[in-house]
Amino acid sequence: MGLSLVTSLFRSEAHLPTYARHVLQVAERLRQASVPLEVVIVANDASSRERALVADLAVAAREARTAHVVASFVERETLYASWNRGVRAASGACVGFWNVDDVRTAEALIEGHRLIARGSAVAYFPFFLLRARRLLGGLQLRQPIRCPAPPFDRTRFRARMPTTAFFLFARPLYQRVGPFDERFRILGDFEWCVRASYAVDFTPGTTVAGFFLRHGANLSGIGDPLQPVEANVVHLRHGAWDNLRPVHGELMRAKWRELGDPGQSIPADVEHRLWGGGAGDWRRAWERAHRRERWSAALRVALRSLLDLPRLRIVRSRG
């Protein structure tokens, strides 16, 4: 059973050399573990530099006989349109994604491939979050934060997405659940995983999947007001009123008109809180209730990161 990893590119020249190096290292480790690897790259509006780097990676992988690299060069499209394109082009029975600015570990891919081969539909893993800030000399990394893979719980997973883009899934599940909603800009993966959670159980892995670098140009986790709005759209679609949070009212109303089910009825009190006259009062009450919770969560994360420093050094040394 083969493993296919899909990568969507757009203006990725700065990350491609490091990504290519990591892909080749991981591919060699997978070859040693007898896991066939296919890398499907979908390059949006690619520059000549990006085309050259992708071609170099394909040649290097072919010469090393470690991975098969398939590249598509397309006009610019949404991330989730590229993901769908990549999944359709992939030949592996086990499919996942590798963001060009992330680092994936071979050990987690091997574990995930084994879980899918044994019948799991979705596998997810712990990972490290690397925060960075931009300085004149480049990026300065902050203390990494370990994000665990909690036991699967449908209610919890439909409230937020702990899988990130490090999850793997069985191809039949994609055919069953359907493609990613290409109209989403940030949380199309969360929307898909919520749909998938109605069909199957997810399986947590134990191996650290890699490093998610938050550098300020990511789609998610950078304070974009659209992110909680898209999350609310997902919750509204499934009637999960308790998972809603206060957002920009007009943006919420516009996105629900764009992405919502025209035939779905929203309770009047929910509309009042989200984009009606009660939106301001709800936001202020919500912020008061969650201020103490945020401080407690930040303290727990800091303590967990300190405890995980020895493990982080081991993972980095393995590459």
Image (tube, rainbow, N blue to C red):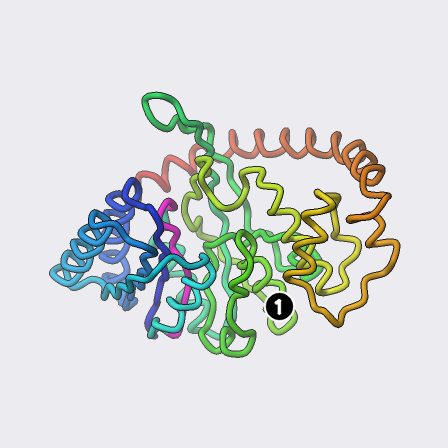
Determine the residue located farthest toward the left in the rendered image. Answer: 63
Residue 317 left/right relative to 83: left
Residue 256 part of the magenta segment: no
User: Image quarter for residue 18?
Assistant: top left
- Determine the residue positioned at 50% across, 73% down: 174
- Determine the residue positioned at 68% across, 62% down: 154
From the viewer's side, name the closer residue of 122 and 139.
139
| Residue on which disc 1 sits | 195
Near mark 1 (Cα within 10 A), the count class, few <14, some 14-19 or many ≥20, is some
Residue 73 left/right relative to 186: left
Determine the residue located farthest toward the top in the rendered image. Answer: 136
Helix, strand or loop at disc 1? helix
Q: What residue type is labelled 1?
A: Arg
Residue 97 part of the magenta segment: yes
Residue 83 left/right relative to 232: left
Give the main secondary structure, helix, strand or loop, of the magenta stretch. Answer: loop
User: Image quarter for residue 139?
Assistant: top left
Residue 51 left/right relative to 298: left
- Determine the residue positioned at 47% across, 54% down: 165
From the viewer's side, name the closer residue of 1 and 70.
70
Q: Is residue 45 above or below residue 171?
A: above
Where is residue 173 shown, x and y percent of the image? 51, 75
> Quarter of the image containing the C terminus?
top left
Total marks drawn?
A: 1
From the viewer's side, name the closer residue of 242 and 48.
48
Determine the residue located farthest toward the right in the rendered image. Answer: 269
Magenta range: 93-102
